[in-house]
Image (cartoon, rainbow, N blue to C red):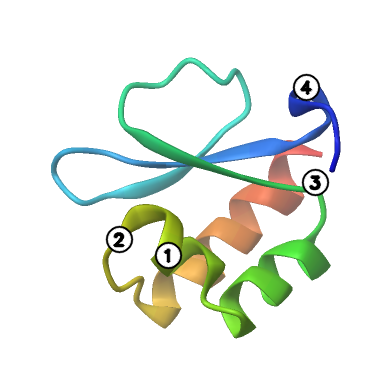
């Protein structure tokens, strides 16, 4: 368990688009991961984001999120 401010929010909009929310204020359903690529990879393997968003998350989305996550650091 970590403080919410130490984590990065992943957002799924109503249109079904996923993005990294560094501000924590974007509209849409959110899920939190720690701010490194390993956590995102672990979430992919354990299907953590799928459980959080209650829908399938395509593999391409993980690649885009990883790139955005690395860019935001």
Q: Nearer the viewer, mark 4 or mark 1?
A: 1
Give percent across and percent down for residue 16.
20, 51
- Depth order, front residue of 1/21: 1
Q: Please tell me which of labels 2 and 4 falls first in the chain.
A: 4
- Depth order, front residue of 22/39: 39
| CA–CA distance in space, label 3 to label 2 | 22 Å
Name the secondary structure under disc 2: loop
Q: Which residue is mark 3?
A: 35
| CA–CA distance in space, label 1 to label 3 | 19 Å
Q: Classify residue 49 as left or right of residue 68.
A: left
Dot label at residue 54: 2
Q: Please tell me which of labels 4 and 1 falls first in the chain.
A: 4
Q: Which residue is mark 4?
A: 5
Task: Give the vertical position of 3 relative to 23 (above or below).
Answer: below
**At 13% from the left edge and 44% from the top edge, which residue is drawn?**
15
Q: Nearer the viewer, mark 2 or mark 4?
A: 2
| CA–CA distance in space, label 2 to label 4 | 24 Å
Badge 1: residue crowd in 10 Å (few <14, some 14–19, many ≥20): few
Badge 3: residue crowd in 10 Å (few <14, some 14–19, many ≥20): some
Q: Nearer the viewer, mark 3 or mark 4?
A: 4
Q: Which residue is mark 1?
A: 51
Q: Quadrant of the N terminus?
A: top right
**At 79% from the left edge and 48% from the top edge, which residue is drawn?**
34
Give percent across and percent down for residue 63.
54, 71
| CA–CA distance in space, label 4 to label 1 | 22 Å
Q: Classify residue 5 as left or right of residue 33.
A: right
Badge 2: residue crowd in 10 Å (few <14, some 14–19, many ≥20): few
């Amino acid at each position: 368990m970590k403080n919410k401010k130490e984590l990065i929010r992943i957002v799924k909009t109503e249109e079904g688009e996923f993005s990294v929310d560094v501000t924590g204020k974007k509209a849409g359903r959110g899920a939190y991961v720690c701010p490194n690529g390993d956590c995102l990879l672990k979430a992919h393997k354990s299907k953590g984001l799928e459980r959080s968003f209650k829908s399938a998350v395509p593999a391409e989305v993980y690649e885009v999120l990883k790139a955005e996550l690395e860019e935001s650091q």
